[in-house]
Image (cartoon, grey):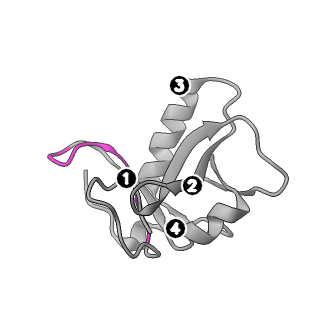
Amino acid sequence: MAKRSLIDVKPVADTGMNLTDSAAEKLQELMLAEGEGVQALRVAVNPGGCSGFTYEMYFDSEIADDDIVRERNGVKLVVDPASAQHVAGATLDFKDGGLNGAGFAIDNPNVSRTCGCGNSFS
């Protein structure tokens, strides 16, 4: 799989987040496998971890009135207002295989420091 450049990344309006095509494609696949009831991928920032904050991503069947909702390639990305300020300018990507493994990753320019295990940030 070719490495994605910043040119390939398109913004998801109002959340301040970017979602790559590879992330949207993988999310579509996973949401179909989850079945009916799944409406969106929710990205949240919660206090915790050794550096101060952690990301939480999960499929959600409920969308609150004050959630920021945007759709890309058929995938709804939902961010609550409190989390939106922490993910402004961040990019959600999916990397498939290779020596570094596969999975979703958030590249967040607002992060000043991460912990040694990479699970929390400040």
Q: Nearer the viewer, residue 88 or 56?
A: 56
The Cα–Cα distance between marks 4 and 3, rounded to whole angstroms, is: 25 Å
Amino acid found under the numbered disc labelled 1: Asn
Image: magenta residue range: 98-108
Residue at point 23%, 42% (across, down) = 97
Q: Earlier in the sequence, mark 4 or mark 1?
A: 4
Q: Quarter of the image holding residue 113?
A: bottom left
The Cα–Cα distance between marks 2 and 4, rounded to whole angstroms, is: 25 Å
Other residues around mark 3 within 10 Å, as few (<14) / some (14–19) / many (≥20) = few
Q: Earlier in the sequence, mark 3 or mark 1?
A: 3
Q: Earlier in the sequence, mark 2 or mark 1?
A: 2
SS under mark 4: strand
Question: Which residue in the protein does label 3 denote?
Answer: 33
The Cα–Cα distance between marks 4 and 1, rounded to whole angstroms, is: 25 Å
Question: Which residue in the protein does label 1 denote?
Answer: 119
The tag on residue 7 is none
Q: Position of residue 106 (x, y in %)?
A: 42, 59
SS under mark 1: loop
Question: Which residue in the protein does label 2 denote?
Answer: 46
- Between tags 3 and 1, which lies in front? 1
> Residue lying farthest right?
65
Examine the rendered structure and indicate whether residue 55 appears above or below residue 114: above
Q: Does the stretch in magenta take in 46?
A: no
Amino acid found under the numbered disc labelled 4: Lys
